[in-house]
Structures are given as structure tokens and as C-alpha cells.
Amino acid sequence: MQVSENSVRINEIFTSIEGEGIYVGTKTIFIRLAGCHLKCRWCDTRYALPMDSGKEYSIHEAKVQIESHLQPFTYKVNFTGGEPLLQHQAIISLADFLKNEKGLKTYLESSCFDSRRFSDILPYIDICKIEFKTPDSGVTKTENYDDLLLNEFECLDMALTCGKTTYIKVVTTNSTNIPWFKELVHDIFSKNRHQRISGFVIQPSNDVDEPTLDKLFNFYDLVFPLYPEVRIIPQLHKEICVR
């Protein structure tokens, strides 16, 4: 299902506590875009994967809906999904409105599968989470995985070059390959990126192939010598029973 250029398909809008990443614990309004073409086996928002989930709004109608959900002292707006880059033109309009008219920090939570679309959105985004998908995530077919990884690195470098608050997240399972993770960490920090990266989050999978403590320590110990600000952070919102 296609969404017209002047419309946006939104699965849900709600205010809650940020449960992931370096801004965990902040009051956040979440705008969950409908539709995702990727196949992460630990996805916890499968209801938002179909492109025809949620409701289609004109951009004006979407702004009205978002305004009606805004609460005082909200720290940021989180564009999530689904996969927000599938509707990148709509994100530009909404992020511009929320950043420049409502004074909110804008945060993009994406798989970074398309660096060209990411580049278009970047001027309107304050905080970039660059998520590196592991091969065992099942995110895409094996033959497409290298292209996804290339786009993720391109998005990382663009965000850092533009001076955005940029952090890295890797969801790990008990099946995540240690040598692969070691190579990823080496590639991330081989270009002296550590001085510009705002955080490195190792997020254990929840309910699906959960990593043992020893496995998490293995991941942590590979990052720490290169970037001591690494953190293991589970999904807080699930621990306190909020969405």
C-alpha cells in the first residue's frame, strides 16, 4: 500500500517514558509510523509492520493529532516504527514543525537502511540512533545484509559530520556471533569516531534468544577498551510495564 506524498500513515501516537538508549527515562512523545519491510526476529511491534496498519492522515491532520497528544515538559519527540524512512518526506514535514514551531528535540529511531533518505531527513533531526543490525537478527536476506551494513555506516558518518547527537545501539542475542561483533566494533572505531559518538548501547533481546550474562560481558569487554562509555541497557519500559 502506497501513501501519497502529502500524507502520512501513523500506527499510533502516545506519550510515555523512553525505555531505550542514552535518553532512557525521559518523557517522550512517540510517533509510530506504519510499515516496515525488514524482518527482525525479535521485533516487539509487529502490529506496526503492515503498511496499511494504523490510519492515514494528511500532513495537516497529523500535526493536529500530534498537538492534541503533546504534554507539558515533554523532552523529545521520537519518530519510530515500523520504519520511519519508508515515509521520509512526511517525517521532514512533521519534524520541521515539531522542532521549529513546538521547540521539541527530534529523535529518529530507524534501521538506517537507506542513507539517501536519511540524508534528506538529517537537517530536521537533533538525535540520531544508529542501530547496527546483527546477522542473526534475520533483518534481511543474507545477500542483502552487506548493503544494509554499508548504509548504516554511511548514516553514522553523516550524522557525526553534521554534529548531531549520535549514539550506537546493537541488539544482541545469545546467538550473536562474537567474532562478528568484534569486527563491527573495530570498524566503528577505526576512523577515530570515538570522540564524536555520544554513546554505545548493547541492548539484550527480550523474550527471544536472550543472551546470558557471560555473553553480555563478552560484548561489553570488546567495546570498553575502545570506548569506555559503553552501557548494557535492557528495555526499561518493559521492566516498569509501560509501552
Image (spheres, helix red, strand yellow):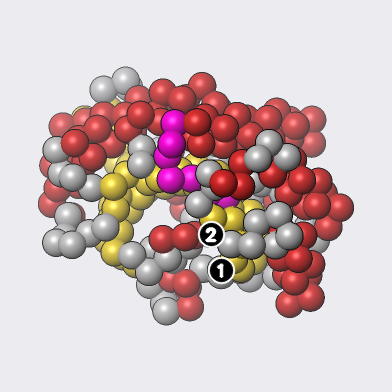
Q: Provide the residue designation for mark 2.
A: 44
Label 2 Cα crowd, 10 Å radius (few <14 / some 14-19 / many 20+): few
Measured Cα–Cα span from mark 2 to mark 1:
16 Å
Q: Which residues are magenta?
A: 162-168
Residue 220 falls within the magenta-colored stretch: no
**Residue at 44% in and 31% down:** 162
The first of marks 2 and 1 along the sequence is 2
Asked if one can make out residue 53 in the rendered structure from this viewpoint, the answer is no
The image shows residue 36 at horizontal and vertical percentages of 52, 39
122 displayed left or right of 180: left
- The amino acid type found where label 2 is placed reads Asp
Residue 87: x, y in percent? 40, 30
Q: Position of residue 154 (x, y in %)?
A: 60, 29
Which residue lies at the image location 22% right of the left edge and 59% below the top edge?
74
Q: Residue 233: which disc?
A: 1
Q: Nearer the viewer, mark 2 or mark 1?
A: 1
Residue at horizontal 32 percent and vertical 44 percent from the top = 106
Disc 1 marks a residue whose amino acid type is Ile
Taking the image as shown, residue 149 lies to the left or right of residue 114, namely: right
Mark 1 element type: loop
- For label 2, the SS is loop
Q: Position of residue 119 (x, y in %)?
A: 46, 25
- For residue 242, the mark is none
Q: Quadrant of the C terminus?
A: bottom left
Total numbered badges shown on the rendered structure? 2
